[in-house]
């Protein structure tokens, strides 16, 4: 038999397809997401720092609570107050006063049978006077027409704020030891008792400052302005990267 003279057909070369493993794809995607989240966190920290780094005139204190009192000038039957007024709680076995909650302005008035009224939970001096008028009006409507506001006074203004930087409390205490108390083993804040105006500040290393014991909002602001230079002096400086 004669041999075929036709050339043999060339063999086809198949290129293998290389498909990445699903785990590799997931790892790449996870790294990308992690990087994006890190960038977002860095931006958030930068924005927060920019908001905290404010000049002194833009570092306000905010009133957290005002406690004050006045006298009605007449004795009050607390049981009658519970029956005729709304939102009044009275349990003489636990406490000798009757508590009345107001919604506008949001506050609590505590009545005593002697006619004394204590107000708390207020966030402005304007609301303090408005609340006293509201409580007097309620008492007059239930039958105590001779009641009036006597000896209206503020006993304590509590406020809080932040200077926007960290503070070296040890140095502040050593420099102002006659006005301050700092025992980090017992409490992580420094007590700074200002004599004029008469305000007590609680200072934390984070820059948060709480004021208490003031008799007016003006005393809080005046005391805070006097305190700022001392806080600036012991400001913790960030080391360069």
Image (cartoon, grey):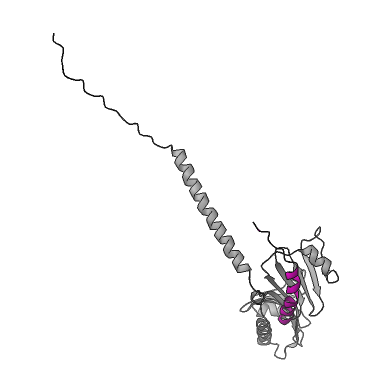
Nearer-the-camera pick, 62 or 121: 62
* Segment tinted magenta in the rendering: 217-241
Give how far across and how far down residue 180 sits, in percent: 82, 69
Q: Is residue 222 magenta?
A: yes
**Quadrant of the image occupied by residue 210:** bottom right
Residue 118 appears in the picture as rendered: no
Q: How many marks?
A: 0
**Residue name at image x 80 percent, y 63 percent:** 170
Nearer-the-camera pick, 175 or 73: 175
Nearer-the-camera pick, 168 or 187: 168
User: Hey, which residue is sitting farthest bottom in the picture?
Assistant: 146
**Residue name at image x 79 percent, y 67 percent:** 172
**Residue name at image x 63 percent, y 69 percent:** 53
User: Hey, which residue is sitting farthest left in the picture?
Assistant: 2
Query: Would you place residue 241 above or below residue 197 in this image?
Result: above
Q: Main secondary structure of the magenta part?
A: helix
Q: Is residue 184 left or right of residue 54?
A: right
Nearer-the-camera pick, 76 or 168: 168
Residue 26 appears in the picture as rendered: yes
**Residue name at image x 79 percent, y 68 percent:** 191
Give how far across and how far down residue 143 sits, in percent: 69, 87
Give how far across and how far down residue 43 sits, in percent: 55, 60
Q: Is residue 226 magenta?
A: yes
């Amino acid at each position: 038999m004669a041999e075929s003279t036709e050339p043999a057909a060339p063999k086809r070369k198949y290129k293998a397809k290389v498909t990445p493993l699903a785990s590799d794809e997931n790892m790449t995607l996870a790294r990308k997401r992690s990087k994006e989240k890190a960038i977002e966190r860095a931006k958030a920290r930068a924005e927060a720092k920019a908001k905290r780094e404010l000049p002194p005139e833009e570092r306000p204190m905010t009133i957290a609570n005002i406690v004050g009192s006045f006298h009605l000038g007449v004795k009050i039957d607390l049981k009658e107050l519970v029956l005729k007024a709304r939102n009044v709680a009275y349990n003489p076995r636990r406490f000798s006063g009757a508590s009345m909650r107001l919604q506008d302005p949001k506050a609590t008035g505590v009545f005593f049978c002697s006619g004394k009224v204590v107000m708390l939970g207020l966030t402005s001096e304007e609301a303090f006077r408005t609340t006293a008028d509201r409580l007097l009006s309620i008492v007059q409507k239930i039958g105590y027409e001779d009641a009036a506001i006597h000896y209206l006074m503020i006993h304590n203004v509590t406020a809080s704020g932040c200077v926007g930087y960290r503070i070296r409390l040890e140095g502040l205490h050593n420099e102002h030891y006659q006005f301050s108390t700092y025992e980090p083993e017992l409490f992580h804040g420094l007590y700074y008792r200002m004599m004029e105006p008469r305000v007590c500040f609680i200072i934390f290393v984070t820059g948060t400052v709480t004021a208490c014991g003031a008799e007016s909002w003006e005393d809080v602001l005046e005391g805070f302005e006097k305190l700022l230079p001392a806080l600036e002096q012991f400001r913790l400086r960030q080391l360069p990267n």
